[in-house]
């Protein structure tokens, strides 16, 4: 079976960096790569998530830190500050267990810390600029954008800011930034705890994609001595299911690997379906790895509950109406055989699942029905 | 007497569908016979199950026999309700309720004699709504009713005459032809003879214990009825024989007493009503509520004549004959005192239909108020807050007379009244006036004009190149979106779906085509064909309720449902000031009736003399020109408001979070 190794990803990134593709629409801030940075990050994370690859990944990180610098120096408009943001972000991003959004939050907190601004307004503008740089670095990543937005909202929405002198206000901002980072880090634990009530003994869980939250949930359930079985979809071409099943088998959870096309075949033995999410959109639907939508459809038509585990920093102010209504995240797909040049290949890495096919969302805000997402977003943003 | 228990014991039957005014058979024929064990008579063509007299109405439901007289009343009512053919909907109930109070003192109904305790009108409340209302209705004089319900009049007398024939007028139009003649012949004697029958009702409790007696009376009545069926004219005598000696003596003394009690109750009711109105602004007036309508009419500036031939289900909505008030009103223009001329002008424009579209109407109204407030001078010894509020109330009721307010206008008025109430006491008159005017101006700017701009910005992001956008009717926000998208160079095509009788889509078509947009124009009949091409549906809205129900131009629901069937996303564009915290379930409760002639006026139809004869003054033909309909939230993919793009489930959040701010602005 074809498996992607972390070094392979890094090699590819290096190689694709050097010859810039003839894409005229690309802005100066955009990640100069036809493969979406979102996908790269995910692939990198998938690579390093298994513990036996951890060391290797860490080693690779050391060698690569210099690699992203030319990438970010592409932005001619980028000031010293924005350059730092990306670098900081990439440093955090290399941490295997840290979500992209949390890395961004950490990087933005670092911006506040390093800022030499003397007024509140200046600081805010600086922060805004930094988050814009981050967002434009990877426009395809939803959680990155959402995390940045939420951070700015959370940090700057303190009434105390107006009265205090600048230094204390700044420390207050930092405090809030730290707190937000902490909350985001804890989110996964909270979700795992919340979801335990839904996993009962003897149930069969279908999992699609390699989500760290879902893995955490299953791990916690196993630690709580729950008896359950997991069906993993293969998740071509990234082999996410293969990775997940090897992780689960280490925890002595009975696991079965299926082809992506065997979902409907085995759905009748499934009790519930678990997904992670790249982003939760305003309608309450989710954007997730390709294949989520069709599994949700199958589950819905067979009346199986579909649960989504997502941290609240993935809530994004997006409202896709259909599949094509979002920025496509493209990825390379290997078919193992030579494809004639005339044949088109669908390269999108993710799809959108409308809310009516989801049962519940497990978030660190609690267990929500899809329609509540919008309520939370309205309260946060308006 | 435990009237409530009786009401509870009876299974309530929900009535649905269209119906004409059918009321339960008269009291005489309705004598409670819960214990009747005699053979079912030939006249009762109903199933043998229903041994209650209401079995005359074909009743599929067996009403369990009950012990009390009141029980029987209610059960009878319920049985009548269960009759399959005449199925009055909720609107009818409302109508009955409305009439209940006003009609209590009319006719020969004699409360003190009643064992039911209904003699004091307050105990009416003991009944379930349905039974109470029907109860009151039965007692009312049938002739009186026939006067109040133009097309129900004959039905009423018929129902009294031959209850077993009480089928809807609509369905058995031909059958009613014959009956009508009978009714006309004995119309006069009818009103006399029914009275004694009713008189007997209050007496009934006295002989409650003697079953046999009651049965005897019942039999007699049945016989009378059977005779009546055979021969209408003779029936009067028969029924007179059935309950002899009770004619015309009692009504006189009792008539004196009744109005007193009822007027007291009316007063308290009015007080309660007033309080309610204070709490809940803009309660919809039910136009089948005679007393309130009459009262409103006395105060009315506009002399509207109600249409004669209304659809039963929509009797609670105002419908006036068009085209005759305008000259009258415009001649009044220089003699009016209570209404400010700016408001008067706007009212006339609403009436004539010169201003249409919710936003335009709302802006015109607010600007008129602005002008009126500028010209306002507080009378001596009066408080500006109080006096201005009453003034505004007067203006509003005038505007309502001209045309029912839209939800958005209601919201705007609520905002204005709040502003007036919140005025600091120490403000001088000129300051207060200028502050109010600037508030109104700000409302127009922020809530309507800027909101539209925000909506356009949001909605344009959902238009991609190569799309086919479908829109229905005319919505100024949708027009702005389409024009703006065209301006910024998006390549798309527009399908405009239109419908009779307003053909508002033509206005949109004209405007879009002159700006160089690629348009297709079609009527709603072709919607299922044209929906194949569409990739997005953009709809305007009159209001969105907190359960996500969209209230918009009639036909919108059809478009949304077809779009849903073709899985085309439906995008509704609506300013947030049109959101309403009420919940709407159907299109019946709150709606607006347009000019029925507009529906009837079909060119090819009119020219044909034969057809025009069938249309004009045909009692069996009613035209329904609904202005709005409601679309359930599940057919809406997205709502674009000034707060961004939100799902319809989030309307209550916006309403809750921003109501305070909305009122404060």
Image: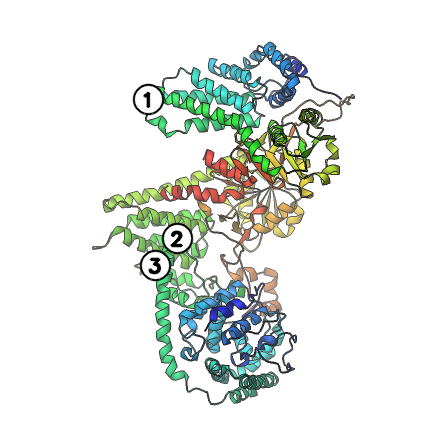
State the SS at label 1. Answer: loop
Q: Which mark is residue B346?
A: 2
Q: Nearer the viewer, residue A340 or B59?
A: B59
Give the image location of residue B475, x and y in percent.
51, 45
State the SS at label 2. Answer: helix
- From mark 3 to mark 1, how far is it between C-alphas? 64 Å
Q: Chain of mark 2?
A: B
Give the image location of residue B365, x and y in percent.
39, 50
Tell me which residue sits at (36%, 60%) in the image: B274
Give the image location of residue A188, x and y in percent.
56, 28
Give the image location of residue B344, x and y in percent.
36, 55
> Do the residues bearing badges 3 and 2 touch, measured as CB atoms within 8 Å?
no
- Mark 2 neighbour class, 10 Å CA radius: few under 14, some 14 to 19, many 20 or more: many
> Do the residues bearing badges 2 and 1 touch, measured as CB atoms within 8 Å?
no
Up-down relation of residue B59 to residue A160 (above or below): below
- Mark 3 neighbour class, 10 Å CA radius: few under 14, some 14 to 19, many 20 or more: some
Based on the displayed image, in which of its 4 quarters is residue B223 positioned? Answer: bottom right
Tag 2 or tag 3, which sits nearer the N-term?
A: 3
Q: Chain of mark 1?
A: A
Based on the displayed image, in which of its 4 quarters is residue A347 positioned? Answer: top right
State the SS at label 3. Answer: loop
Whether residue B462 is visible here, answered yes or no, is no
- Mark 1 neighbour class, 10 Å CA radius: few under 14, some 14 to 19, many 20 or more: few
Which callout, 2 or 1, points to the residue nearer the camera? 1
- From mark 2 to mark 1, how far is it between C-alphas? 55 Å
Q: Which residue is mark 3?
A: B333
Up-down relation of residue A226 to residue A331 (above or below): below
Left or right: residue B370 compared with residue B128: left
Whether residue B482 is visible here, answered yes or no, is yes
Q: Which residue is mark 1?
A: A165
Which callout, 3 or 1, points to the residue nearer the camera? 1
């Amino acid at each position: 079976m074809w498996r992607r190794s972390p070094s392979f990803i890094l090699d590819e990134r290096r190689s694709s960096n050097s010859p810039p593709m003839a894409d005229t629409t690309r802005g100066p801030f955009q990640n100069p790569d036809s493969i979406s940075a979102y996908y790269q990050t995910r692939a990198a994370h998938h690579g390093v998530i298994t513990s036996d690859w951890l060391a290797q990944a860490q080693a690779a990180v050391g060698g690569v830190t210099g690699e992203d610098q030319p990438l970010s120096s592409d932005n001619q408009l980028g000031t010293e500050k924005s350059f730092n943001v990306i670098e900081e972000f990439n440093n955090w991003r290399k941490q295997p267990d840290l979500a992209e959004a949390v890395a961004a939050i950490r990087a933005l907190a670092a911006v506040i810390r390093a800022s030499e601004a003397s007024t509140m307004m200046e600081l805010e503008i600086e922060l805004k600029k930094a988050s814009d740089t981050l967002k434009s670095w990877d426009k395809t990543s939803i959680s990155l954008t959402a995390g940045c937005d939420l951070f700015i909202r959370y940090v700057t929405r303190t009434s105390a800011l107006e009265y205090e002198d600048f230094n204390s206000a700044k420390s207050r901002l930092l405090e809030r930034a730290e707190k937000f980072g902490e909350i985001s880090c804890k989110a996964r634990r909270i979700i795992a705890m919340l979801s335990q009530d839904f996993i009962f003994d003897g149930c069969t869980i279908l999992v699609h994609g390699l989500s760290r939250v879902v893995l955490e949930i299953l791990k916690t359930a196993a630690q709580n001595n729950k008896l359950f079985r997991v069906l993993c979809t293969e998740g071509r071409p990234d082999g996410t299911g293969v990775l997940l099943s090897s992780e689960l088998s280490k925890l002595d959870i009975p696991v079965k690997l299926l082809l992506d096309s065997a979902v409907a075949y085995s759905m009748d033995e499934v009790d519930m379906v678990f997904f992670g999410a790249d982003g939760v959109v305003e309608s309450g639907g989710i954007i997730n790895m390709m294949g989520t939508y069709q599994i949700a459809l199958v589950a819905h038509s067979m009346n199986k509950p579909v649960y989504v585990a997502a941290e609240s920093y993935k809530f994004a102010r997006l409202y896709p109406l259909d599949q094509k209504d979002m920025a496509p995240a493209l990825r390379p797909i290997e078919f193992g055989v030579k494809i004639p040049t005339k044949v088109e290949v669908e390269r999108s890495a993710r799809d959108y699942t409308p809310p009516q096919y989801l049962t519940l969302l497990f978030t660190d805000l609690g267990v929500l029905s899809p329609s509540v997402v919008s309520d939370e977003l309205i309260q946060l943003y308006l | 007497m435990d009237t409530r228990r009786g009401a509870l014991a009876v299974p309530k039957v929900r009535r649905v569908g269209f119906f004409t005014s059918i009321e339960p058979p008269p009291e005489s024929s309705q004598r409670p016979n819960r214990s009747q064990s005699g053979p079912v008579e030939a006249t009762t063509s109903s199933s043998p199950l229903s041994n209650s007299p209401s079995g005359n109405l074909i009743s599929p439901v067996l009403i369990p026999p009950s012990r009390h007289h009141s029980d029987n009343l209610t059960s009878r009512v319920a049985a009548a309700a269960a009759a399959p053919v005449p199925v009055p909907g909720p609107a009818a109930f409302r109508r009955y309720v409305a009439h209940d109070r006003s009609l209590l003192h009319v006719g020969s109904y004699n409360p003190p004699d009643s064992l039911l305790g209904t003699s004091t009108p307050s105990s009416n409340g003991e009944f379930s709504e349905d039974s109470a209302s029907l109860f009151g209705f039965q007692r009312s004089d049938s002739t009186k009713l026939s006067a109040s319900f133009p097309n129900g009049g004959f039905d009423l007398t018929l129902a009294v005459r031959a209850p077993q024939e009480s089928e809807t007028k609509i369905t058995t139009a031909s059958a009613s032809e014959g009956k009508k003649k009978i009714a006309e012949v004995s119309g006069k004697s009818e009103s006399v003879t029914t009275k004694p029958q009713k008189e007997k009702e209050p007496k009934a409790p006295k002989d409650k214990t003697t079953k046999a007696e009651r049965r005897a009376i019942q039999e007699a009545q049945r016989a009378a009825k059977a005779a009546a069926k055979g021969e209408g004219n003779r029936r009067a005598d028969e029924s007179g024989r059935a309950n002899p000696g009770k004619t015309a003596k009692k009504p006189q003394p009792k008539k004196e007493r009744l109005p007193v009690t009822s007027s007291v109750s009316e007063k308290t009711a009015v007080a309660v009503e007033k309080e309610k109105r204070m709490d809940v602004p803009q309660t919809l007036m039910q136009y089948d509520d005679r007393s309130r309508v009459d009262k409103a009419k006395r105060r009315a500036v506009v002399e509207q004549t109600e249409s004669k031939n209304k659809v039963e289900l929509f009797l609670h909505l105002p419908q006036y004959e068009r085209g005759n008030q305008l000259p009258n009103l415009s001649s009044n223009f220089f003699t009016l005192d209570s209404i400010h001329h700016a408001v008067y002008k706007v009212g006339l424009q609403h009436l004539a239909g010169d201003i249409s579209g919710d936003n335009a109407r709302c802006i015109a109204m607010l600007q008129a108020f602005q002008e009126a407030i500028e010209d306002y001078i507080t009378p001596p010894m009066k408080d500006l807050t109080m006096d201005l509020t009453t003034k505004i109330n007067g203006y509003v009721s005038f505007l309502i007379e001209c045309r029912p307010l839209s939800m958005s206008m209601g919201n705007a008025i609520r905002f204005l009244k709040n502003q007036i109430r919140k005025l600091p006491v120490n403000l001088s008159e000129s300051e207060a006036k200028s502050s109010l005017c600037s508030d109104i101006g700000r409302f127009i700017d922020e809530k309507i004009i800027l909101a539209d701009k925000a909506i356009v910005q949001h909605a344009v992001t959902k238009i991609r190149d190569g799309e086919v956008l479908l829109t229905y009717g005319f919505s100024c926000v949708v027009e702005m979106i389409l024009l703006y998208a065209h301006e910024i160079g998006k390549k798309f095509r527009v399908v405009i779906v239109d419908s009779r009788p307003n053909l508002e889509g033509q206005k949109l078509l004209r405007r879009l085509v002159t700006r160089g947009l690629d348009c297709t124009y079609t009527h709603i009949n072709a919607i299922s064909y044209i929906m194949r091409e569409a990739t997005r549906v953009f709809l305007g809205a009159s209001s969105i309720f907190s359960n996500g129900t969209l209230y918009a131009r009639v036909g919108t629901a059809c478009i949304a449902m077809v779009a849903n069937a073709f899985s085309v996303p439906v995008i509704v564009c609506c300013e947030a000031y049109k959101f309403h915290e009420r919940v709407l379930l159907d299109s019946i409760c709150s709606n607006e009736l347009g000019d029925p002639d507009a529906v009837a006026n079909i060119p090819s139809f009119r020219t044909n003399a034969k057809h025009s004869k069938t249309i004009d003054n045909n009692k069996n033909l009613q035209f329904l020109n609904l202005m709005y309909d409601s679309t359930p939230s599940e057919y809406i993919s997205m709502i674009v408001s000034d707060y961004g793009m939100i799902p319809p489930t989030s309307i209550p959040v916006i309403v809750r979070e921003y109501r305070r701010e909305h009122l404060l602005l």
